[in-house]
Amino acid sequence: MTVARQPPPHAKVDTVSRIVRVDLDGRGYDIVLGSGVLDQAGALIADRLPGRPLIPIADASVAPLYLDRLTASLKGAGLRQAAPIMVPSGEGSKSFERLADLLDQILERGAERRTVLLALGGGVVGDLVGFAASIALRGLDFVQIPTTLLAQVDSAVGGKTGINVRQGKNLVGAFHQPRLTLSDLDLPSTLPRRELLAGYAEIVKYGLIDRPDFFAWLETTGQEALDGDRAARLHAVATSCEAKAAIVASDERETGLRALLNLGHTFGHALEAETGYGPTLLHGEAVAIGMVMAFDLSARLGFCPAADAARVRMHLSAVGLPVDARSLGLDQGCVPRLMERMQRDKKVKDGSIGFILADGLGKARLVSGIPPQQVAEILAASLPL
Ligand code: NAD
Ligand code: GLY
């Protein structure tokens, strides 16, 4: 069970607006959400992890924006902190080389078992630092301080950590839960609009998985959340964290229900791989296109009303997300290769691709045994000749 609650009085954080709890046996943790959380980081960490030595680790592009505020807050709370470590921004940092370099720097700073790593940045830094934490000295504690919308609603919640390898994205990693996630809702204001929208796609995903009322709310108010209205942003991020926390609490290691979080990802990952995981298509954009495809396929198979698929397409398009693969420099000749890429997806079991499809808005489920021809036709319909 997961509950959203007001901060307890001992938290000494008057600017914090919400706390969502991720309930995991003995490894549960708080996601603290609100404006000004970054400046309260010291107090919040001192409250939950008193007296622990800290190593801040920051995305190199995020550091000039927010690292000083973090270190000042830690200092203000009287916490012991090592010199910060910088990680070059970009997906390339989720590599063995960068991991080795990071582990070197962590050990050079005299890390001991009680040391806590602080990950300041988006999903790249969160995934990399989390994985380093899972193996340094056989396991260190870490705190997520997500700075992108995507990381606040997805990667900083749930304990999946890892790096990319030659064979594919996120194929080496560990389940390692943070001890605390600190989400300052003001930080994504410095993101390029495209990155903000990419995070929004993951917010929509939670509505489509199992929260139809939330999806309906997003249809009317999602734009305000995107534009930075504080109350709307808080509701969107907190509801997303609650939705993810509830799924993670019931299936931490993805033996069943957690697979639903991959709605849109089977199609999306194939498109991302085909476009080289680069700036042509951001992860969240791929998820947006993938969710449209998943609903179109669901409607084609008679699982959900065509009107539901149309609502998904309409909302994503209305906020400015891509809903087809027409502008990616691909064409219908790519379909066989995209099908091959899907065949290598982590959800393939005994040769059959598992798709997250839907019986309607907020009614997602895992389905296997879908005829490949139906999948190929959905892909072709999204691509130019
Ligand atoms: P990212 O970490 O690469 O950040 C995107 C860009 O924004 C980077 O250039 C970064 O330097 C910059 N940036 C970050 N915060 C900023 C800010 N506040 N202002 C200005 N610029 C800022 O990308 P992301 O979208 O946050 O995360 C994507 C990664 O997350 C992928 O590697 C993906 O595999 C991973 N992911 C992991 C999970 C999980 O459960 N662990 C879930 C979803 C995605
Ligand atoms: N982002 C998918 C998961 O955390 O399971």
Image: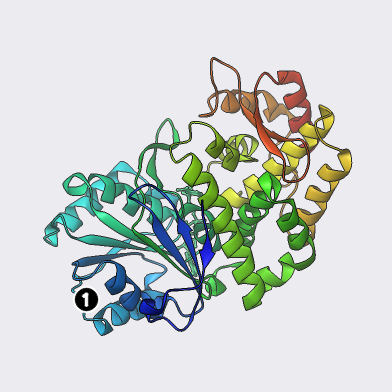
Relative side of 56 to 359, left or right: left
Name which quarter of the figure residue 196 lies in.
bottom right
Q: What element carries label 1?
A: loop
Q: Name the residue under label 1.
A: 79
Image location of residue 202, percent across then percent down: 61, 53
Q: Looking at the image, can residue 77 be seen?
A: yes
- Three-letter code for the amino acid on which mark 1 is drawn: Leu
Relative side of 219 to 279, left or right: right
Q: How many marks?
A: 1
Q: Is residue 90 above or below residue 293?
A: below
Closer-to-camera residue (114/185): 114
Where the C terminus falls, by quadrant?
top right
Name which quarter of the figure residue 172 lies in.
top left
Q: Is residue 138 above or below residue 79?
A: above
Image location of residue 259, percent across then percent down: 55, 36
Q: Residue at x 54, y 58 (%)?
A: 241
